[in-house]
């Protein structure tokens, strides 16, 4: 079984608050690389057991049931201040996974949709679901390939993005680029008046 | 194509043993990112092997449910049951996740943003 982790595995004692961002996109688009680049720990993986209609299974009877399935999740972590830590979950965005990751979105600040210019259409479904759910999102084009990247205007048109939705281009291996993509998402969440709690109770 | 399958690990075939036959966690508030901290020493004789492993892991410092599951190589659903029991017994405590009920406030978002900007 798992070996005992060393000291840097743990969060600083002062950290009290965790925030969660989903990194969603099609197979091999660079989700794990993206999470790895920003993570301060070796990326970890765990699994969630879920029903076909998207509910997380708390009932262990369900584990052997045919209506449940197991989703592998890669995730990483970055401590952002004395008290706040960010968790990033790489989540498959293919059609057959959509209902499953919806549950993971509970309590998430938002989602970053990672897309590959050579197959933009594979990210369309996931964007539709995010819009239906009302989860704030941004789009990051992973430019690891040598393919010419269309202009942002063309990309916005292809994705049919509203003007306020952030769109950035980044290399998933590059820390400042991935940080910039994450910043664009959080700035968007901050600018959306109904996405966060009111100033006073 | 079928969804990704976990590699065959023995732990998956015996979740009932791991959780002492418990099917549900005693609380439904444990998210993958709920932070968990050890609170007091427990008598190992009263604990299951998985509970002991969980407490030993958590005694080193704070971790999220997702990290506990990953380090112990247990499914997240099983980990929730184990942690919920240990919270009920007073051996583990959850750190505040209050904002997850109402959404993050502006101050928290600004702190996230400042932390990300410092990474660039």
Image (cartoon, rainbow, N blue to C red):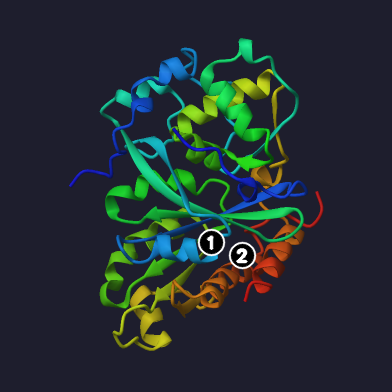
In the displayed structure image, the side of residue A172 where residue B62 appears, left or right: right
Residue plotted at (21% across, 43% down): B2
| Label 1 packing within 10 angstroms: few (<14), some (14-19), many (20+) | some
Q: Is residue B11 above or below residue A87?
A: above
Residue plotted at (46% across, 43% down): A103
Q: Looking at the image, which is closer to me, A46 or B73?
A: B73
Quadrant of the rendered structure where residue A146 is? bottom left
Q: Are marks 1 and 2 in contact (CB under 8 Å)?
A: yes
- Residue A25's spot in the image, x, y percent? 37, 62
In the displayed structure image, the side of residue A152 where residue B43 appears, left or right: right
Asked whether residue A66 is in view, the answer is yes
Q: Chain of mark 2?
A: A
Q: Is residue B51 above or below residue A47?
A: above
Label at residue A136:
1
Quadrant of the rendered structure where residue B104 is? bottom right
Asked whether residue B27 is in view, the answer is no
Residue plotted at (74% across, 55% down): A198
Residue furthest to the left = B1
Q: Chain of mark 1?
A: A
Badge 2 marks a residue whose secondary structure is: helix
The span from disc 1 to disc 2 (Cα, nearest Å) is: 6 Å
Q: Looking at the image, which is closer to me, B53 or A97?
A: B53
Say which residue label 2 marks.
A189
The tally of labels here is 2
| Label 2 packing within 10 angstroms: few (<14), some (14-19), many (20+) | many
Label at residue A185:
none
Badge 1 marks a residue whose secondary structure is: loop
In the displayed structure image, the side of residue B7 where residue A173 appears, left or right: right
- Identify the image quadrant of the N terminus of chain A: top left
- Residue A70's spot in the image, x, y percent? 34, 38
């Amino acid at each position: 079984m798992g070996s005992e982790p060393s000291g840097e595995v743990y969060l600083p004692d002062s950290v009290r608050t965790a925030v969660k961002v989903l990194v969603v996109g099609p197979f091999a688009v660079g989700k794990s690389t993206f999470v790895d680049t920003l993570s301060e720990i070796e990326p970890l993986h765990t699994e969630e057991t879920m029903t076909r209609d998207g509910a997380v299974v708390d009932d262990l009877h369900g584990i052997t049931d045919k209506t449940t399935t197991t989703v592998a999740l890669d995730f990483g972590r970055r401590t952002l201040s004395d008290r706040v830590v960010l968790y990033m979950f790489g989540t498959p965005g293919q059609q057959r996974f959509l209902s499953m990751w919806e549950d993971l979105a509970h309590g998430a600040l938002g989602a970053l949709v990672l897309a590959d210019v050579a197959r933009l259409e594979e990210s369309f479904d996931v964007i539709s679901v995010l819009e239906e759910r009302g989860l704030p999102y941004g789009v990051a084009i992973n430019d690891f390939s040598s393919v010419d990247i269309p202009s942002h205007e063309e990309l916005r048109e292809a994705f049919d993005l509203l003007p306020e939705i952030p769109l950035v281009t980044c290399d998933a291996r590059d820390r400042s680029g991935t940080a910039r993509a994450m910043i664009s998402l959080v700035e968007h969440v901050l600018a959306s008046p109904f996405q966060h709690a009111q100033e006073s109770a | 194509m079928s969804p990704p399958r976990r590699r065959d690990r023995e732990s998956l075939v015996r979740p009932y043993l791991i959780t002492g036959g418990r099917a549900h966690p005693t609380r439904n508030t444990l998210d993958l990112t709920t932070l968990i901290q050890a609170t007091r020493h427990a008598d190992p004789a009263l604990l299951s092997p998985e509970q002991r492993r969980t407490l030993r892991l958590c005694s080193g410092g704070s971790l999220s449910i997702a990290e506990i599951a990953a380090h112990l190589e247990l499914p997240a659903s099983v980990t929730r049951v184990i942690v919920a029991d240990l919270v009920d017994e007073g051996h583990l405590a959850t750190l505040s996740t209050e904002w997850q009920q109402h959404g993050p406030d502006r101050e928290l978002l600004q702190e996230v943003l400042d932390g990300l900007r410092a990474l660039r």
